Amino acid sequence: MKQIAVAVAIALSLIACKNETKTNDKKNDLAVETIVEKTSKEQKEIQQLITSFFNNVDERNWNEVAAKMSDSVYTDYTALGGDAGFKTPNEILTGWKAILPGFERTIHQTHNEAIWVAGNRASATLDAIATHYLKGDFWTVFVGYDTEYIKENGSWKLARIDLSLYNQAGNNELSSKAIENVKNGNIPPLVKANNTESIETFFSSLENKNLKGVLSTLEDNIIQEMPFAPNNFPKSLNGIEAMRTQYTGVMDYTQSYEREYFGTPNPNVILVKYNGTITTGEGKPYNNYYVGIYELSNNNKIQKFVEQFNPNILLNGWPGLQPETYSVHKAGAKTNSGVKLEKVNFNSNGVSLAGHLFLPPNFDSTKKYPTAIVTGSWTSVKEQMPDEYASLMAKNGFITLTFDFTGFGESEGQPRQVEDYNLKIADIKAAVDYLSHHQNVDTEQISGLGVCASSGYMAHATAQDKRIKKLILIAPWLHNPAIAKSIYDMRPNGTDGLLNAAKKAKEKYAETGEMDYVLAASELDPLSAMYVPENAFDYYLDPAKAAGAKYDNRFAVSSWEPWLTFNGISAGKEISQPVFIVHSESGAVPQGTKDFYTYLKGQKDIVWLNEYNQQQLYFEADAVNAAMSQVVYYLK
């Protein structure tokens, strides 16, 4: 391991490159496998906690719910009209018990969990369909949860739960009736589901590709409602012939459903929580999650059912449908805009990097186009702000490339989540190599566009590589060691403590192959890379913004050394190419940008969009479009 230790001391980037023929690297690979197994075990424990937590809420097992929470939990239910702040489990349950038992049934269908573990801290995002049923009426919310966990005495405990409202359906006034029921002591009992034969036949017929069996369970005047269905998908089906048409189209699908039945005081109303494992007729996986409300006739046939599912999964998996935009939220170009996305891979120092190549509308394979490489903030992945800006540039006639840096997202590289400017600058120059050999790229019109922290990396790459003809910076975070120290000295043990932790992490990795991590973003942990208490800056945490499975919410502790010693500002002295900057006085370290700007000796321009803050320039459609209009105007 001595050779690796030397390599780590010189540059962690050397370790990140693959070299499977060396004995030391094989030992390192085994260490990585052990770490992955350990992480997977802890992720599974948190997954089980999440499932058990919400199941016990629905079953009103309040002691079990309380046992899964830390002594103090930060909750934020402001999206549903609630409050935010730290509470004890008893205070939380007092609020929940004042409403939830007033419904005849509640069902939380949780799914899409993305769980990240860093030592004794963890975070998870998840989606949920939460249905509340009372006397023939329902209220359902489709929500995202952003949660954090602390390991206490060997067990994971929920320490934060923050809800984002995506959509809702049904009667949103139903909650007031539930509250009145509780106040009056009129708490409906939980009832077992007994009258399930027709519904079970419905599911088994789907699994057996038996259309006749499906239709035999339905009344002629059957109504199926799908309140969360996206555009270009039916919101309702009325009558047996509409059902025949719809279900004929899925009879060649391979379907399997895990299902659980829940009764109501009305024996003819059954609620079903189910998830489907489906392969479409074109061989594409489609695995969605549902809460169904089934109303039976006196003939025990289904006369109405409300099917509630995750529309985003439908858009990503159902034949003929696609997500609305090319990013994880609404700021990117629309997928029907004519822009095309190609998945690509290219090499950087022996590591395969995964990228997205965006082609403009009416792309002509015989022509050459102006081109841009687009990179995002620190710890980010291509699906976040890079894809938003890149897809909008492509809509305006550019070929654009986004990619995951070494050790991030879908790209190769070990250890993961290392924020090292050496690696990232090298990756940008590798992206220039890739584009320079693309037959449709005008090599005299290659621009580099950096958002936030990657602005410093892109600036240095531009200074070092004259093939980048123009530099564009949006909401740039540009710092030097002095600025970094002024910011991070406020952390526990200050800048020196972080540098010491980085040194120890590198030494540990060199000896054991195990990297220490902290959460990249946290509202609770002051040792996280981005400590953002009370929603001060929740872009990386909120599944309605940029969190989720694509984003790994971890930060390699070794990253503190290159991050705190990096000087992005000094690159301005070496840049001769034209530079255009879009920033905000309420954005990140504006003084760093001003210092950088004064160093520039060539053509330069800067626009201040002071009506927006840093986070808005990451994902809000108005802010992103305002910035992009400035960039396109400048380039054209």
Image (cartoon, rainbow, N blue to C red):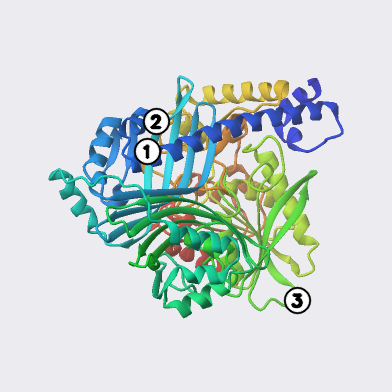
Question: Relative to residue 170, is residue 408 depicted above or below?
Answer: above
Q: Residue at x 33, y 60 (%)?
A: 268
Q: Left or right of 316: which side holds 614?
A: left
Q: Which residue is mark 2?
A: 68
Query: Measured from the top left, where is residue 421 in percent x and y?
Result: 65, 40
Identified by mark 1, the residue type is Asn
Answer yes or no: do the residues labelled 2 and 3 have beta carbons within 8 Å?
Answer: no
Instruction: Using the rendered image of the protein, determine whether residue 79 is visible from the camera's viewpoint.
Output: yes
Mark 1 surroundings: few (<14), some (14-19) or many (≥20) residues within 10 A: some
The residue drawn where x is 16% and y is 46% is 186
* Disc 3 residue type (three-letter): Lys
* Image height of 355 relative to 527, above or below: below
Tag 2: amino acid: Lys
When asked about the image quadrant of residue 117, the answer is: top right
In which quadrant of the rendered image does the C terminus lie?
bottom right
Instruction: State the CA–CA distance, disc 3 to disc 1.
Output: 61 Å
Q: Nearer the viewer, mark 2 or mark 1?
A: 1
* Location of mark 1 (residue): 56
Q: Residue at x 42, y 54 (%)?
A: 272
- Mark 1 or mark 3, which is nearer the start of the sequence? 1
Please determine whether, in this image, residue 242 is positioned above or below residue 419.
Answer: below
Q: Earlier in the sequence, mark 2 or mark 3?
A: 2
Q: Earlier in the sequence, mark 2 or mark 1?
A: 1
Q: Nearer the viewer, residue 524 or 617?
A: 524
The image position of residue 115, as x and y in percent, is: 53, 40
Q: Secondary structure at mark 3?
A: loop
Question: Disc 3 designates what residue?
Answer: 367
Name the residue rendered at 45%, 40% in the picture: 51
